[in-house]
Amino acid sequence: MSENVIYGVASVFVNPDYRRRGYGARLMNELAKILPKMRRGSSSSVGSILYSDIGKGYYTKFGLLAFPVNYHLEFDPKTGPVSTHARFVRTEDLPQLCQDDEAISQKLMASLPPGKTRIMIVPDIDHILWHISKEAFACQKIFSHIPQAKGALAGEHGRRVWVLWAHRYYGHPYSSPEDNTLYILRLVIEDHEPTPEQFKSQVQYLKAVLQIAQAEAADWGLQSVKLWHPTSLIQKLVEQSGLEYRHVNRDEDSIASLRWFGDDAITEDDLEWVASEKYAWV
């Protein structure tokens, strides 16, 4: 296992008056030449990522592999009593939680069996603050104040479950609220190998933090809560929780794509993106 640099390509845009003239393709081809040579300090880059909103085909022309399965779980906003199992995560909690998450993630990556090339975008404080800064700008403009809760946490140390979230407004909440979403940026299960009794507790902890997320979405006029790519353990916990949700496959938008700069040719079957969650989106 090693730590390397991966660049994110985002907001690829061509003025509508100049489309279909090859400018977008030229831009991507120039990036394909430059990014493999770029360095950050003493570290060279091993790849670049992009989330396509125009399906899986276009960016493959520039060496990006589009991951075949892109999905999320979607929960409706819902008001109700806040569970005593959980509490809000505040801004001052974020540095330590992200540090703990990094340690958990490193341990998980080191434990995975050989045979595949695996990448994981580090869920560090910078990624979380980037999303929260976007949230703060939009909420200040719309409401003249910003959300204080940055997530929710339940359970005792060593058995904790927590979510970090961001409020995303694609339209004004009073006129075009349809796509406005509370995104779960990151969901962390501290214990990945629970006993049967611990699993029951995890179900309650996960249910508690997701119910708080649903209430947060309702309070801020958001139309859904979205959780990207839950692990098999999280999927089982959600199923056991009794919460209503929808499984949504994404075929056109937010398609996770990766270009690998390594010497060896690599295919979708050779590659695994661990924790392809919303925090990694740029």
Image (cartoon, rainbow, N blue to C red):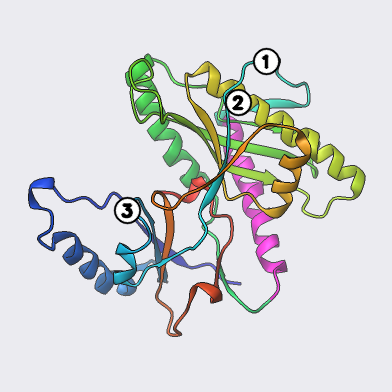
Residue at image point 48% right, 26% down: 223
Type of amino acid at the residue the image marks with label 2: Gln
Q: Residue 222, percent across and down? A: 48, 24
> Regarding mark 1 in the picture, which secondary structure is present there?
loop
- According to the picture, the residue beneath numbered tag 1 turns out to be 80
Closest to the camera, between mark 3 and mark 2, is 3
- According to the picture, the residue beneath numbered tag 3 turns out to be 54
Which mark is drawn over residue 214? 2
Give above or below for 151 relative to 106.
Answer: above
> Regarding mark 3 in the picture, which secondary structure is present there?
loop
Type of amino acid at the residue the image marks with label 3: Ile
Type of amino acid at the residue the image marks with label 1: Gly
Closest to the camera, between mark 1 and mark 3, is 3
Residue range highlighted in magenta? 92-113
As measured in the structure, the alpha-carbon distance from the residue carrying label 1 to the one carrying label 3 is 38 Å
Specify few, some or many for label 2: CA neighbours under 10 Å numbering under 14, 14-19, or 20 or more: many
Residue at image point 40% right, 34% down: 133
Residue at the bottom extreme of this rendering: 264
Asked if the residues shown at circle 1 and circle 3 are in contact, with their CB atoms under 8 angstroms apart, the answer is: no
As measured in the structure, the alpha-carbon distance from the residue carrying label 3 to the one carrying label 2 is 29 Å
Q: Residue 143, percent across and down? A: 38, 15
**185 sits to left or right of 110:** left
Q: Which callout, 3 or 2, points at the residue further toward the start of the chain?
A: 3
Q: Residue 166, percent across and down? A: 49, 33
Asked if the residues shown at circle 1 and circle 2 are in contact, with their CB atoms under 8 angstroms apart, the answer is: yes
